[in-house]
Image: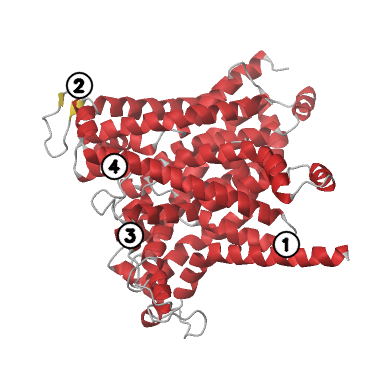
């Protein structure tokens, strides 16, 4: 008897959860579906959800017409470039804070985080003017520099929490066995740290890919990543729903897939360890 | 035991990150404060001069500034209410036994990974458009007049779009927190005859209080800087009806070329963010000790 009630209850929860889940996901699903319609079909009234002539012509049109791949490539270079550069700067810093903590380590960490709290608009004007004067406006290099700096605190912090979990005794043991600092890092620490570094990389690529303040303000045509490319689709092109949908689907698909793998790291990375 | 050697090595390894962040923080910040005390217009190069707090006074006397301040608070507050309340309810639901829980979780989290410009454009054109958007279709189907969301309720519409983007974040963090709740305590309360509502009120909610605070503080930091959603949907309009502080500074400095006035707005934004940041840092700092 108790079993039957709990099954019925489970069914109730299941139905409620699926309805809400699908409702939240619906705008994305609708965008994907619309991207396979013809323009006429996309604005037909009443709209059709499934039973229309599926076509991929929008994808080829978007790619032909708008240099889609250049913007895609810009996004790849900017998000990967800023993340890798950030990791190169952050790994030594996080390593030393985790394994050779000094009196001020905690303060340094907190101070690094506090730089993340600076609202971008508070420093937009000087950065814009400096970039204009040194010719970094609308360049990939400029954006890589800015995104590296704004994500550096998160990268250091995430790596620190991962490195903290590596037992220090192992390092001591290897030191006793005569390993040099270099050997210690290459042969002992790196293999144990790779999972943490990978998660940090993943989360930061996602954050950099979707960053839409600096990418919109510091680029024009040349270095514009997908965020800025899509913004240029606001009216009148935005009213071509099918093409807008195809461009949007291509812009979000890679990150949607990466994101689903990074759910756990998301909590850790974005709450700075305050929620476990 | 850290040796003298490893300690100095550590200092060398940490310095690039520290120096870069120090430069990133101090140089633009000092320049913003400096610019905010100048009359500085990009269209009139060479006429810069020191004007003291004039920019702040002009900002203060400009009704658009107060509208932008109010809009900023409404935007942050509105999104926080929707995402925290919605996030708690959703987290509790997702914590129940459900068939296909992993898939539902993925569906719920998805909006967080959509870039802001895409979600703004999709909502604006395919849902809120008064002629051919889905909401208009729905209104027509049930015999109502289609509503022009972005013209007649621009700020509320933007709150809706931004809430959709941030609900997954709140849900995910609150779900993580709920799952660390001791189930024995729940069962004991249930055996003692506590109703579901009182169990929620006296056990779940206090357990979540810390996570809720973290969600509120972190979201506030990001929500104070909402920009792309406004740029793409309304350009801050009609008039300044959906202009927040971030957008106002952008419009002032990069559209009207008034660097001095824009910088004054930037300084106000920094002060506003710092008030929140102080509380957030204190919470994170406490956790670091534990």
Q: Quadrant of the N terminus of chain A?
A: bottom right
Q: Earlier in the sequence, mark 4 or mark 2?
A: 2
For the residues tagged 1 and 2, is the chain the same?
Answer: yes
Q: CA distance from mark 4 to mark 1?
A: 45 Å
Q: Position of residue B22 (x, y in %)?
A: 43, 25
For the residues tagged 4 and 2, is the chain the same?
Answer: yes
- Is A103 placed above or below A169 here? above
Dot 3 falls on a residue whose secondary structure is helix
Find disc 2 in the rendering and name its residue.
B52
Q: Position of residue A110 (x, y in %)?
A: 54, 26
Q: CA distance from mark 2 to mark 3?
A: 39 Å
- Tell me, for residue B98, which label it has, or none: 1
**Label 4 crowd (10 A; few <14 / some 14-19 / many >=20):** some
Front one among B10 and B198:
B198
For the residues tagged 3 and 1, is the chain the same?
Answer: yes
Front one among B238 and B43:
B238
What residue is shown at x 37% (from left), y 51% (from top)?
Answer: B228
Question: In screen coordinates, is B94 left or right of A250?
Answer: right
Q: Earlier in the sequence, mark 1 or mark 2?
A: 2
Find disc 4 in the rendering and name its residue.
B67
């Amino acid at each position: 008897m108790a079993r039957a009630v709990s099954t019925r209850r489970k069914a109730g929860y299941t139905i409620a959860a699926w309805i809400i889940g699908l409702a939240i996901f619906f705008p994305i699903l609708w965008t994907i579906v619309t991207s396979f319609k013809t323009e006429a079909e996309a604005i037909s009234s009443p709209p059709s959800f499934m039973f229309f002539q599926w076509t991929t012509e929008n994808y080829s049109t978007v790619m032909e017409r708008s240099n889609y791949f250049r913007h895609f490539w810009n996004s790849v270079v900017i998000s990967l470039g800023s993340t890798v550069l950030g990791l190169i700067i952050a790994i030594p810093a996080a390593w030393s804070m985790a394994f050779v903590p000094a009196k001020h380590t905690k303060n340094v960490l907190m101070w690094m985080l506090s730089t993340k709290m600076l609202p971008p608009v508070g420093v937009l004007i000087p950065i814009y003017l400096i970039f204009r004067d040194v010719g970094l406006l609308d360049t990939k290099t400029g954006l890589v520099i800015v995104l590296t700096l704004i994500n550096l605190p998160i990268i250091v912090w995430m790596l620190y929490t991962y490195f903290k979990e590596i037992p220090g005794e192992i390092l001591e043991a290897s030191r006793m066995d005569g390993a040099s600092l270099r050997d210690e890092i290459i042969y002992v620490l790196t293999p144990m740290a790779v999972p943490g570094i990978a998660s940090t990389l993943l989360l930061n690529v996602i954050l950099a890919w979707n960053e839409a303040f600096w990418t919109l303000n510091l680029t024009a045509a040349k270095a514009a990543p997908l965020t800025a490319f899509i913004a240029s689709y606001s009216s009148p092109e935005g009213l071509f729903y099918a093409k807008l949908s195809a461009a949007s689907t291509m812009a979000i698909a890679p990150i949607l897939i990466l994101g689903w793998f990074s759910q756990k790291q998301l909590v850790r990375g974005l709450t700075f360890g305050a929620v476990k | 035991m850290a040796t003298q050697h490893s300690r100095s090595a550590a200092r060398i390894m940490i310095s690039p990150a520290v120096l870069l962040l120090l430069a990133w923080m101090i140089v633009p910040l000092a320049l913003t404060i400096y610019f905010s005390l100048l009359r500085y217009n990009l269209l009139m190069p060479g006429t810069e001069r020191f004007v003291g707090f004039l920019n702040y006074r002009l900002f203060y006397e400009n009704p658009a500034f107060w509208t932008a301040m109010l809009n900023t608070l409404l935007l942050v507050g509105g999104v926080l209410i929707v995402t925290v309340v919605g996030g708690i309810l959703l987290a509790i639901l997702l914590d129940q036994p459900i068939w296909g829980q992993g898939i539902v979780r993925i569906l719920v989290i998805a909006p967080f990974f959509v870039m802001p410009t895409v979600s703004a454009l999709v909502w604006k054109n395919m849902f809120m458009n008064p002629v051919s958007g889905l909401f208009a279709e729905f209104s027509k189907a049930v015999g109502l007049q289609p509503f022009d969301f972005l013209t007649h309720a621009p700020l509320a519409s933007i709150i809706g779009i931004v809430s959709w983007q941030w609900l997954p974040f709140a849900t995910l963090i609150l779900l993580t927190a709920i799952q660390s709740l001791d189930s024995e305590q729940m069962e004991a309360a249930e055996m003692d005859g506590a109703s579901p509502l009182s169990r929620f009120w006296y056990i779940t909610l206090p357990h979540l209080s810390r996570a809720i605070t973290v969600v509120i503080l972190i979201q506030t930091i990001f929500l104070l800087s909402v920009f792309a959603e406004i740029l793409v949907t309304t350009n801050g309009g009609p008039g300044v009806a959906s202009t927040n502080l971030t957008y106002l500074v952008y419009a002032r400095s990069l559209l009207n070329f008034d660097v001095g006035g824009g910088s004054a707005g930037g300084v106000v934004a920094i002060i506003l963010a710092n008030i929140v940041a102080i509380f957030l840092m204190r919470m994170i700092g406490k956790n670091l000790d534990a």
